[in-house]
Image: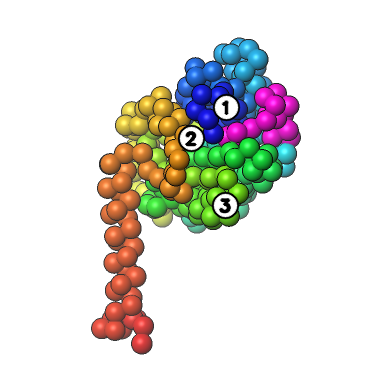
Amino acid sequence: MDGVTARRWLITGISGGLGSALADAALAMGDGVAGTSRNAQAARAFEARAPGRAIGIPLDAGDPRQAGEIVARAIDGLGGIDLLVNNAGYAQAGAVEAVSGEEAQAQFDANFFGPVALIRAALPGLIDRGGRILNISSLAAVETYAGLGHYCASKAALSAISESTDTEVAPLGVRCIAVEPGGMRTAFAGSSLRKSRARLPRYGEQDATQDASFRKSDGRQSGDPARIAQLLLRLAEMTDPPSRMVLDMAALDRVERAVAKRLDGYRRAASPHDDIGFP
């Protein structure tokens, strides 16, 4: 894509946090942005940021059934899509045993099935234009945390399918990148957080520790959405981006520790000196 020519973005979840910051950064560059918000008032307010270039779409990006309409509205409002950013999502807290099937389905709809449906709907146009897909995943795709099993699983699935998609569409001129940030100053640990309706006594200590951690971190996370938005603007122009990436050295250190721990487990299981090792 030509860095001088105005680009057309479809960004999910523009009501706040990273989605709002990225939309503002793109609009400031003269680009057009179609943004989704489940709140109709927020979608209308978004259009006032840059009349004619900001298109508010009051639909739920976490509902796979709405993906086709979201993409159609973005194309109708902007004349096409050059970049799809799957940003909308949330964290479902609770022990794996405590999270209900309904809660688990909603988590995967928001963080995985919704984004995948948007990828499918947007790809024909992106292939025509040599576009790009940015999936906002998480360090939780690599690390895992007690009490956030479904969130970790949904983000791991998003990163994995991003990598597979990138392999499939790179020969067609499209790149698909999973961005795996650490903590950002968003509503992640506050108003966006959902806790399992069931609170089982055997996980009481775990739940209390996690609740305290969320309260302490809410609004105090190290990641600045405005700074990360600028990094994403650069990523959108990178000639040969990786299919998965983190955004700073602290996150890279955590990835390296998580991967090293996993490799150690694989190696110990494969050792002929281990009772459960390979023959």
* Residues at marks 1 and 3, CA–CA distance in whole angstroms: 22 Å
Q: Nearer the viewer, mark 3 or mark 2?
A: 3
Q: Which mark is residue 7?
A: 1
Whether label 1 touches label 2, CB < 8 Å: yes
Residue drawn 36% across the image and 39% down it: 247
Three-letter amino acid code at disc 3?
A: Pro
Residue 242, image x, y percentages: 43, 47
Residue 185 as seen in the image, left or right of residue 53: left
* Residues at marks 3 and 2, CA–CA distance in whole angstroms: 17 Å
Is residue 161 visible from the viewing direction of this image? no
Kindly identify which residue carries mark 2.
236
Three-letter amino acid code at disc 1?
A: Arg
Residue 190, picture quadrant? top left
Which quadrant is home to the N terminus? top right
Residue 205 as seen in the image, left or right of residue 152: left
Of callouts 1 and 2, which one flags the residue occurring earlier in the amino acid sequence? 1
Q: Helix, strand, or loop for circle 3?
A: helix
Q: In the picture shown, does residue 31 fall above or below 279? A: above
Q: Nearer the viewer, residue 85 or 220?
A: 85
Of callouts 1 and 3, which one flags the residue occurring earlier in the amino acid sequence? 1
Q: Which mark is residue 171?
A: 3
Residue 9, picture quadrant? top right
Q: Nearer the viewer, residue 200 or 137?
A: 137
Q: In the picture shown, does residue 41 fall above or below 276? A: above
Q: Main secondary structure of the magenta part?
A: helix
Is residue 168 visible from the viewing direction of this image? yes
Which quadrant is home to the C terminus? bottom left
Residue extent of the magenta highlight: 69-84
